[in-house]
Amino acid sequence: MKEKTVEQAYAMAKERYAETGTDTDRVLDILRGISLSLHCWQTDDVAGFEKLSGPLSGGIQATGNYPGRARNIDEVRADILKAMSLIPGRHRLSLHEIYGDFSGEAVDRDQVGLEHFRSWIDWGKEHGIRLDFNSTSFSHPKSGNLTLANPDDGIRNFWIEHTKRCRAIAEGIGKAQGDPCIMNIWIHDGSKDITVCRMKYRSLLKDSLDEIFRTEYSNMRDCLESKVFGIGLESYTVGSNDFYIAYATRNRKIVTLDTGHFHPTESTADKVSSLLLFSPELMLHVSRPVRWDSDHVVIMNDETLDLCKEIVRCDALGKVHIGLDFFDASINRIGAYVIGSRATQKCLLQALLEPLDTLRDYESRNMGFERLALLEECKSMPWGAVWDMFCLRNGVPAGDDFIPEVQKYEKEVLSKR
């Protein structure tokens, strides 16, 4: 897209938005300050670098076999840098524990340490990328159906030690980068069929978490992520949304909302205002469920738009951490990163462009017709011209100009793997 065309379109859009009281230059400055936390596992279909892990388990699936999957740490890093070069703004990277730099050695998960992530810290500093972290309880000989809620003391203590070590790693990462590392805990624990010991497993999970959080850190933030069910664990999930909301609220931890982890008729956006009244911060995993928690690539759909609008309407940009969590092995993986990240940013942009003062005034005066009419008009405002200018100012391709860049990388890099 020609620079002159983008500038001309933006000038007209800027004037149009000014009529509604919105300063588009200010909006672009705010949007640039919002960092997404990209997920490393889109590069290689959640394979990681362990010698111990087997096929995906714990209710996780990556479907498809598109050529070019990253096979090692260098390829993962190269793919992430390529994706980030096509996404406007500066963003973070979220690592799962299985992506440590193990140098070909077999390091079990209760033995992992900060030394296995030193090269990631150095790489992040080199490229100006801050890191987040996740414990990894799935795809392991000891994961089974129960980890932190396992009645077997040996297995449960193994996963307690693993999670403790992950928190220590996150603390080390946060201290090294001078910015808190957001550490997410998600476990798949559950039952395929009816269980009569719901309280028992949840009591064990509570005790495990109490032990894990016994040490307090200042350079990381703990997040707890629920799920409705997992494949093969459909009837009962120990770490349900109710469990984690109660635990996190009582223990001042952050709740993680994954947009694929709720009933299809639930609104994740509606949960934002409720949780922020009782929790200092909120973590999001933005995904796209299709009939189930399928982790499709994020697109600019109503659910993502509503979520971003609610964050802005709650004045919560400084309280909400926005991470991505999808893994599609059926299309070009770099393209998937770019589509999902840019779609999330487009939703945030539209949220920031809303004439909130006017809308709130209408609502306060019970002017329902005027409020609805203005919300509808916002949908056809020239936000696309503002988006193209955001890309231009951040030195990335505007419009669909990123497609040839992804195709070139596939031809020159991915196709040779």
Image (cartoon, helix red, strand yellow):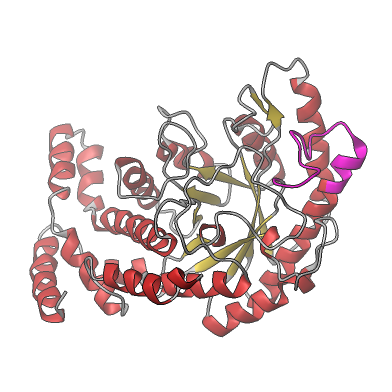
251 with respect to 82 (left or right): right
Q: Is residue 146 magenta?
A: yes
Q: 54 or 237, which is in the foreground?
A: 54
Instruction: Please say whether residue 154 is visible from this viewpoint.
Output: yes
Q: Residue at x 52, y 62 (%)?
A: 69
Q: Quadrant of the N terminus?
A: bottom left
Instruction: Please say whether residue 23 is visible from this viewpoint.
Output: no
Q: Extreme bottom residue here?
A: 126
The image quadrant of residue 317 is bottom left
Rendered view: 26 above or below 265: below
The prevailing secondary structure element of the residues shown in magenta is loop
| Location of residue 269 in the rendering, given as x and y in whole percent from the top left corner | 41, 40
The image quadrant of residue 95 is bottom right
| Location of residue 64 in the rendering, given as x and y in whole percent from the top left corner | 47, 48
| Location of residue 338 in the rendering, given as x and y in whole percent from the top left corner | 37, 63
Rendered view: 97 above or below 249: below
Q: How many marks?
A: 0
Q: Residue at x 78, y 63 (%)?
A: 168
344 with respect to 244 (left or right): left
Q: 390 or 270, which is in the foreground?
A: 390
The magenta span reads 138-158
Q: Extreme front residue here?
A: 416
Q: Residue at x 13, y 54 (%)?
A: 381
Q: Residue at x 32, y 47 (%)?
A: 305
| Location of residue 378 in the rendering, given as x and y in whole percent from the top left corner | 16, 49
Q: Is residue 250 magenta?
A: no
